[in-house]
Every structure is written in structure tokens, then in C-alpha cells.
């Protein structure tokens, strides 16, 4: 199955995924809910921020508008870094943002929230894992993972090895299928760090994830 890319090169043909996919929706809801829980000014770092805004295709618009992700829908077309700043402003908080867009972060700054979502984290996690483990000791880290484990035994072993490294750490994980009819991968969003032990935040993230999962799975369960 070929990788998705923009049909119109002016929209950014080098992108390896469609902005506004189910992973972006789940991640965006989690970021908004974290901000609402945190409830004050914050320092934010995003080492893989990309563009500030992305074009929204009609399929993306229909996907987002038909989903229960109401928070993300208000920021449709915004990158994660822009979404964080926009949603914090709506809540009346200021964000000191440290954003870059490079292949590999050279260092991680002290911050209240770190978003770590390179597209190829599934393949390259050993390069970054120790850095993230250290960062999550004192700060909240949101990790996006395109989990390819449904594709075969080797991918499943890769995923098992990754999860083994995070055993014993406070971790919340939300997962939705990449596609309703042919779910050959999972979109996963992790929250690791002090916030993962907070019952109020856990409940909010769980509810949002289950609503999105049910909405997506229902689409693949019935045709008629």
C-alpha cells in the first residue's frame, strides 16, 4: 500500500502522512485536555513542530467534523505546536514555546510539557528513549507513536521491546486504529510523567479516547 501524499505538490508533497488523520485528532484532544488540567502558564517544547498550519482537505474536514473530538475541531489545520498556543490562549494562559524542526533533538529543555512525535519513532526509538526516560522523571511528556505491530511478528517484537523499556514508569496510553476497515497500524498517544498519576487527568483522557475509538470502530462494523 503506497504512502499517502498530497495530490497537489503546492500543498507539500514531501509529507508522509495526511495532517488531520486519526492520530492527529487523538493527539490534539490529549494536548487540549492536558492544558485544561494544568491550568496555568507553561513552558512547552516541540522538537518536531513542522509548519504552523496545514491545508485541510475535504476528507479531513469531514473526518474531523464527524468525530467527537470537539476540541481538536476548533484548531483544525493547526500544527500541534500552534494548537497548544491557541488553546492556551483560549484558556487565558501564556505559553513560552521552544519549537524546532530537525531530524534529531540535540537536547531537551526543562519544560512543563514536551511533545515528542517524529513520524518514525517506531523505527528509531532506541536513539531517543533514554533522553525521554530522563525527561519524564520530572516533566510531562506526550509521545506520539505510529504503532506498526499489527503488520507482522518482527514489528510486534519491536513494539514489545519499546514497551519493556517503559515498565515501572507512570504511563497513560490511548490507542485508535489507523483505519476503520483495514487497521494495519495503531495511532498511539502516551502521557508519561507526573501528570500520568493524576486521577482527574486520567479520567478525562480515557473518556476522550474511548469516545474516539467507538466512533472509529463503529464505522468499520457495519455497511448497508
Image (spheres, rainbow, N blue to C red):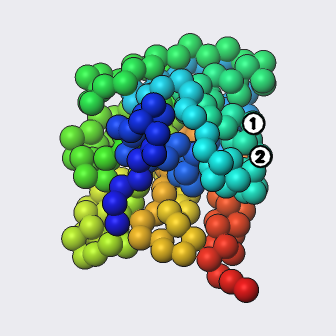
**Dot 1 lies on which element?**
loop
Tell me which residue sits at (46%, 39%) in the image. 8
| Towards the viewer: 224 or 134 | 224
Residue occupying image coordinates x 55% and y 63%: 176
Q: Are marks 1 and 2 in contact (CB under 8 Å)?
A: yes
> Who's the residue at 48% across and 56% down the image?
188
Question: Toward which corner of the image does residue 209 lie, by quadrant?
Answer: bottom right
Q: Seen in the image, is 6 located left or right of residue 76?
A: left
Tell me if I can see residue 170 in this picture: no
Instruction: Assess disc 2: are there few (<14), some (14-19) or many (≥20) residues with their C-alpha within 10 Å of its C-alpha.
Output: some
Which label was assigned to residue 70?
2
Which residue is at a point 45% across and 44% down the rendered structure image? Answer: 6
| Rendered-image quadrant of the C terminus | bottom right
Q: Where is residue 165 in the image (x, y as percent from the top left)?
A: 29, 54
Q: Where is residue 116 in the image (x, y as percent from the top left)?
A: 42, 37
As measured in the structure, the alpha-carbon distance from the residue carrying label 1 to the one carrying label 2 is: 7 Å
In the depicted structure, whether residue 222 falls above or below residue 111: below
Q: Residue 166: which numbered mark, if any? A: none
Query: In the picture shown, does residue 198 fall above or below 159?
Result: above
Is disc 1 surrounded by few (<14), some (14 to 19) or many (20+) residues within 10 Å? some
Could you say which quadrant of the image residue 57 lies in?
Answer: top right
Q: Can residue 69 be seen in this snapshot?
A: yes
Q: Is mark 2 on a helix, strand or loop?
A: helix
131 and 116: which is toward the camera: 116
Task: Residue 85 in the image: state x and y as whole percent.
Answer: 63, 22
Can you give x and y, in whole percent of width and height, for residue 168 in the image? 40, 55
Q: Decide which of 137, 191 is in the foreground and name it.
A: 191
Read off the residue under disc 1: 74
**Image quadrant where one finds the N terminus:** bottom left
Count the numbered circles shown.
2
Q: Name the side, left or right, on which 9 lies relative to 174.
A: left
Amino acid at each position: 500500500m503506497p504512502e499517502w501524499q498530497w495530490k497537489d505538490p503546492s500543498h507539500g508533497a514531501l509529507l508522509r502522512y495526511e495532517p488531520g488523520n486519526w492520530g492527529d485528532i487523538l493527539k490534539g484532544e490529549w494536548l487540549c485536555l492536558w492544558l485544561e488540567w494544568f491550568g496555568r502558564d507553561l513552558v512547552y517544547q516541540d522538537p518536531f513542530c513542522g509548519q504552523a498550519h496545514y491545508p485541510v482537505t475535504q476528507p479531513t474536514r469531514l473526518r474531523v467534523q464527524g468525530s467527537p473530538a470537539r476540541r481538536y475541531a476548533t484548531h483544525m489545520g493547526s500544527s500541534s505546536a500552534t494548537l497548544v498556543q491557541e488553546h492556551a490562549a483560549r484558556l487565558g494562559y501564556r505559553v513560552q514555546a521552544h519549537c524546532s524542526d530537525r531530524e534529531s533533538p540535540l537536547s531537551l529543555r526543562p519544560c512543563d510539557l514536551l511533545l515528542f512525535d517524529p513520524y518514525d519513532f517506531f523505527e528509531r526509538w532506541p536513539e531517543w528513549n533514554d533522553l525521554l526516560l530522563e525527561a519524564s522523571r520530572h516533566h510531562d511528556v506526550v509521545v506520539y507513536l505510529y504503532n506498526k505491530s499489527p503488520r507482522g511478528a518482527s514489528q510486534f517484537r519491536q513494539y514489545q521491546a519499546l514497551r519493556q523499556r517503559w515498565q515501572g514508569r507512570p504511563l497513560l496510553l490511548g490507542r485508535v486504529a489507523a483505519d476503520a476497515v483495514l487497521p494495519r497500524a495503531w495511532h498511539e498517544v502516551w502521557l508519561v510523567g507526573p501528570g500520568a498519576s493524576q486521577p482527574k487527568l486520567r479520567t478525562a483522557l480515557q473518556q476522550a479516547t474511548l469516545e474516539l475509538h467507538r466512533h472509529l470502530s463503529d464505522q468499520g462494523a457495519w455497511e448497508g
